[in-house]
Amino acid sequence: MALPRRKFLHLLLGTAASPALSSIARAQVYPEHPIRLVIPFPPGGVFDATGRPWAEKVKPHLGIIVVENVSGGGSMLGTAAVARAKPDGYTILLGGNAGLVTNPIAATKSPYDPARDLEPIAVIGHNPTLIEVHPSLPIHSLNELVAFAKAHPGKLSYGSSGVGSPNHLVGELFKALTGAEIAHVPYRGSGPAVTDLIAGHIQLLVQSVTGQAIELHNTGKLRILAVTSTKPLSTAPSIPTVHQAGFSGLASQNFIGLFAPKGTPTAIVEKIAQATHTAMADNDLQHRFVSAGFEPELDSTPEKARDILDQELAKWAPIIKAIGLKLD
């Protein structure tokens, strides 16, 4: 027997709405058990110094967060594990530029596509880059650095924390934008590079913001020319940004953020994002981020996080390809 038209439409609309209603229903009871936060780096690093405090602060809103360090492959191992996890909101990633931008682009065959396989939740902090020189050099600005490099081609070398690191890419972007001829000297981490800069073995260093670097600048042991953030550092507002220095194209900030497997219900993503927004308003959490070298992001959303990921992928892909970077 044929259904009356009104009843048929009612059933049809109910069927179409059921996935959305199901998502909302799941979010209302979520979480029912502990959430796994994957940090794709070894314990003790800056990701631990931000991820673990975040897990503590969202506990009143999301319950227990079990932090698991899954390191390897330049953070690709842990990132791939989240990309392959069940999209139910119980596995999330604390990711950054290395695992979500540099490595997938530079790898011959990446086990995941960050734009396709991961769902952005929120960016919780940014770690901009410092451009520094040995204080014996007659260089006090980026313009003076460009002029000096062009007047002394092949005489300058810059250090970074390693091939393929975000700092290496900033150095190469600076060269591409200015035409300056500066050799790259990769180190195993920023510590040895800072030591060699202070000793005068290298003249220039590109490194992430750290409290140590600011202190060395303040005591005259190195000279910071600019920071690549879009706004002045809260801990050192007198250091010019690249925009203030006239090099807006050099603006970049290594981000750290929360990501879920693609297909995680929107209502659950929004619930984690809202809990994060509430937690990031906590002054103690902000202080802990700043102490770790990150400028806290207080007003992120899934949409803003998606925009940042897309912008970073578009920004660095041509640089990585231009220098022929391969990380396999």
Image (tube, rainbow, N blue to C red):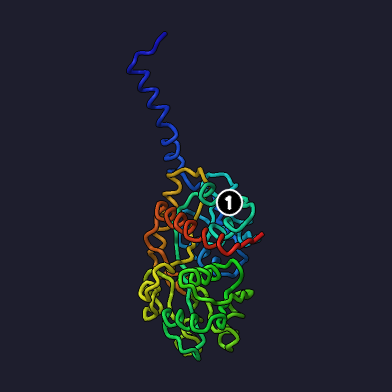
Q: Is residue 41 visible?
A: yes
Query: Looking at the picture, how far across and down is residue 33, in whole percent?
Result: 54, 49
Locate the C terminus by quadrant: bottom right
Q: Nearer the viewer, residue 151 or 96?
A: 151
Q: Quadrant of residue 190?
A: bottom right
Q: Is residue 246 above or below residue 109?
A: below
Indicate the position of residue 154 as horizontal and vertical percent values: 57, 80
Name the foreground residue: 159 vs 215: 159
Return the residue nearer the eye: 237 or 51. 237
Q: Amino acid at mark 1?
A: Val
Secondary structure beneath dot 1 equals helix
User: Is the residue marked by circle 1 packed among few (<14), some (14-19), or many (20+) residues within 10 Å?
Assistant: many
Residue under label 1: 82
Q: Residue furthest top?
A: 1
Name the image quarter holding the N terminus: top left
Residue at the location (43% across, 79% down)? 142
Residue 49 shows up from this direction: no
Which quadrant of the view contains residue 327?
Answer: bottom right
State the residue at coordinates (56%, 78%).
158
Q: Residue at x 59, y 79 (%)?
A: 191
Total numbered labels: 1
Vertical comparison of 54 with 151: above or below: above
Residue found at the very far left of the displayed protein: 6
Residue 215 horizontal/vertical position (percent) = 47, 84
